[in-house]
């Protein structure tokens, strides 16, 4: 009697567990497909973001005056704020690559600002670019 009950209970558990397992496998497949599509979509945007940051770094490296430094800060801030929503959709590996480029730009900009003594002008350029980017996003 106990053996029959045990076999019957195992059979019932197997019957009720099968649809749940099938559903979880289907959900996993859908999630994997969605994440793969998201990565494919953001790969082009990621490359664009990397190119923007790389050009900003080279522009800052070649800046030879206070005005060039402030223009570079303005361009970097305006372009990077527009790409902020792209950053949220990147993978952790891609985020690390972007973070390295942002740190490189920070190092270059701090050195150039110290060299040319244009901290106030650079802050004003950042503020101006931020306001313009925010106003364009709100439209």
Image: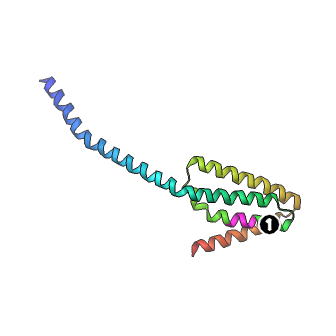
In x, y percent, where is residue 62? 82, 60
Q: Is residue 76 magenta?
A: yes
When asked about the image quadrant of residue 70, the answer is bottom right
Q: Is residue 136 above or below residue 43?
A: below
When asked about the image quadrant of residue 121, the answer is bottom right
Residue at the image position 62 percent from the left and 74 percent from the top:
135
Give the camera-side residue of 85 and 35: 35
Q: Which residues are magenta?
A: 73-78
Q: Main secondary structure of the magenta part?
A: helix
Q: Secondary structure at mark 1?
A: helix
Residue 65 as seen in the image, left or right of residue 8: right
Residue at the image position 51 percent from the left and 53 percent from the top:
39
Is residue 78 visible in the rendered image? The answer is: yes
> Circle 1: is it few (<14), some (14-19), or many (20+) Cα within 10 Å?
many
What residue is disc 1 on?
A: 70
Q: Is residue 19 magenta?
A: no
Residue 132 as seen in the image, left or right of residue 125: left
When asked about the image quadrant of residue 109, the answer is bottom right
């Amino acid at each position: 009697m106990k053996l029959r009950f045990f076999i019957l209970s195992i059979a019932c558990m197997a019957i009720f567990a099968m649809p749940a397992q099938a559903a979880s496998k289907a959900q996993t497949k859908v999630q994997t497909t969605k994440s793969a599509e998201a990565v494919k979509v953001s790969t082009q945007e990621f490359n664009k973001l990397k190119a923007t940051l790389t050009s900003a770094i080279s522009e800052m490296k070649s800046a030879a005056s206070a005005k060039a430094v402030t223009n570079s800060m303005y361009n970097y801030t305006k372009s990077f704020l527009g790409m902020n929503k792209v950053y949220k959709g990147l993978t952790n590996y891609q985020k690390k690559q972007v973070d390295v480029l942002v740190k490189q730009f920070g190092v270059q900009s701090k050195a150039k600002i110290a060299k040319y003594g244009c901290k106030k002008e650079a802050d004003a350029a950042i503020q101006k670019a931020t306001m313009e980017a925010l106003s364009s996003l709100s439209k």
